[in-house]
Image (cartoon, rainbow, N blue to C red):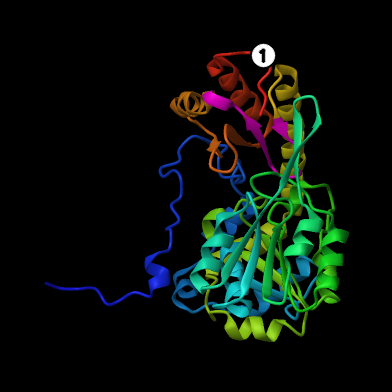
């Protein structure tokens, strides 16, 4: 009988990551993607690619210079990655091995746990605090005192998403900077994938990596820019840390199509800004609609709203799915919770109408 080679015990015991849904046709309000697609200029750039370009290995110099400048950085402090997932794996590879500690605050992006466990590091899990901020309105917040009490001599890496997925919580940038300054031997990875939806011109911690050698900040082209299918992210870090990141990173992780698309997208920031405004209006509409119906929801600074549906979660998911509307099941993060991506106002109105038609018990629904 043929036998497989022996796997590392750590990998054999690892819990696999499975995307929740395949064949996601319809109104995609489940994965927090851009619900319109991408800028028309991106499609033009894709059509302009020729066989000669695709036959060559990517040339990063010009693209990296242009894209980093769009974020007010340079290649000295910006590394292109194959989505933020690639940046997460790179940070774990660089900082955390067997015996080291990696801290995450849950509920959060599953990939932090996924790569930390692959590395053999000890995963330390904290929880966001869930509290009421008004009638039917709640928020998840970061307990800074608990986080400080957790960081010790073996803590090599801390992951914080801000805004956080799936809670929508926005951490105080100054509080995160204070943490990085207080623990200079620990790396702080701040995932800002949803930063475009905080406010117009929001910079987050992008300017601060110039002065904090233990701060890494990730941005993505998957959300506001509408390029999730091409897998492109940016990892920003201090210039003294960047040589180690580049040395550790795979040399050809980003493909030529992603580079061309991102350059075109960055040249059409007006399109991204128009979509951002639409999303923020949709988010406000969703929050108001839930409040009017007495449905508990969590405050969000991202392009989605987490809400409580209780025992109706599965019937609601199935009913909307039959109508071609996809929501995200987040019961694994919080009992009775669903998440709705906020797209255009027209898409939001369609989703809300379907939700109310499927909701069996109108009235106040509490978490």
- The residue labelled by disc 1 is 363
Q: Is residue 299 in view from this perspective?
A: no
Indicate the position of residue 87 as horizontal and vertical percent values. 61, 69
Task: Give the left or right position of residue 225, taking residue 97 as reference.
Answer: right
Front residue (pair 180, 253): 180
Residue 159 belongs to magenta span: no
Name, please, the residue furthest toward the left: 1
Residue range corresponding to the magenta coloring: 297-311
Q: Residue at x 60, y 17 (%)?
A: 356
Q: Secondary structure at mark 1?
A: loop
Front residue (pair 71, 21): 21
Q: Residue at x 74, y 29 (%)?
A: 287
Total marks placed? 1
Residue 275 is drawn in which quadrant?
A: top right
The C terminus - image quarter: top right
Front residue (pair 255, 41): 255
Q: Residue at x 80, y 57 (%)?
A: 144
Indicate the position of residue 189 as horizontal and vertical percent values. 70, 67
Indicate the position of residue 236 as horizontal and vertical percent values. 73, 71
Indicate the position of residue 300 as horizontal and vertical percent values. 74, 41
Q: Is residue 346 in view from this perspective?
A: yes
Neighbour tally class for label 1: few under 14, some 14-19, many 20 plus, Cα within 10 Å = few
The N terminus - image quarter: bottom left
Residue 235 is drawn in which quadrant?
A: bottom right
Vertical relation: 74 (above or below) 347:
below
Vertical relation: 321 (above or below) 250:
above
Task: Give the left or right position of residue 281, taking residue 63 as reference.
Answer: right
């Amino acid at each position: 009988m043929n036998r497989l080679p022996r796997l590392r015990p750590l990998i054999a015991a690892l819990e696999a990551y499975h995307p929740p849904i395949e064949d996601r046709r319809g109104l995609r309000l489940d994965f927090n993607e851009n619900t319109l697609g991408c800028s028309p200029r991106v499609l033009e750039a894709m059509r302009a690619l020729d066989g000669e370009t695709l036959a060559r290995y990517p040339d990063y110099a010009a693209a990296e210079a242009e894209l980093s400048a769009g974020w007010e950085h340079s290649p000295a402090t910006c590394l292109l990655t194959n989505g933020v997932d690639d940046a997460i794996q790179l940070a774990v590879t660089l900082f955390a091995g067997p015996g080291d500690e990696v801290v995450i605050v849950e509920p959060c992006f599953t990939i932090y746990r996924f790569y930390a466990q692959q590395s053999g590091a000890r995963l330390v899990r904290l929880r966001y605090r869930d509290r009421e901020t008004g009638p039917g309105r709640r928020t998840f917040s970061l307990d800074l005192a608990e986080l400080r009490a957790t960081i010790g001599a073996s803590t090599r890496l801390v992951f914080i998403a801000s805004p956080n997925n799936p809670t929508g919580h926005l951490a105080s940038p100054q509080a995160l900077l204070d943490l990085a300054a207080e623990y200079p031997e620990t790396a702080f990875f701040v995932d800002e994938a949803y930063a475009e939806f905080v406010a117009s011109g929001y910079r987050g911690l992008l300017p601060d990596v110039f002065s904090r050698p233990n701060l890494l900040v990730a941005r993505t082209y998957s959300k506001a820019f509408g390029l999730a299918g091409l897998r492109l992210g940016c990892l920003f870090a201090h210039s003294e840390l960047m040589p180690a990141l580049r040395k550790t990173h795979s040399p050809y992780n980003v493909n030529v199509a992603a580079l061309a698309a991102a350059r075109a997208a960055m040249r059409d920031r007006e399109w991204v800004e128009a979509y951002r405004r639409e999303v923020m209006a949709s988010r406000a509409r969703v929050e108001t609609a839930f409040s009017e119906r007495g449905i508990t929801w969590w405050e969000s600074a991202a392009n989605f709203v987490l809400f409580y549906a209780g025992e109706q979660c599965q019937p609601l998911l199935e009913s909307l799915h039959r109508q071609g509307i996809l929501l995200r099941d987040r019961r694994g993060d919080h009992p009775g919770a669903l998440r709705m991506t906020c797209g255009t106002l027209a898409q939001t109105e369609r989703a809300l109408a379907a939700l109310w038609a499927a909701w069996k018990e109108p009235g106040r629904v509490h978490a």
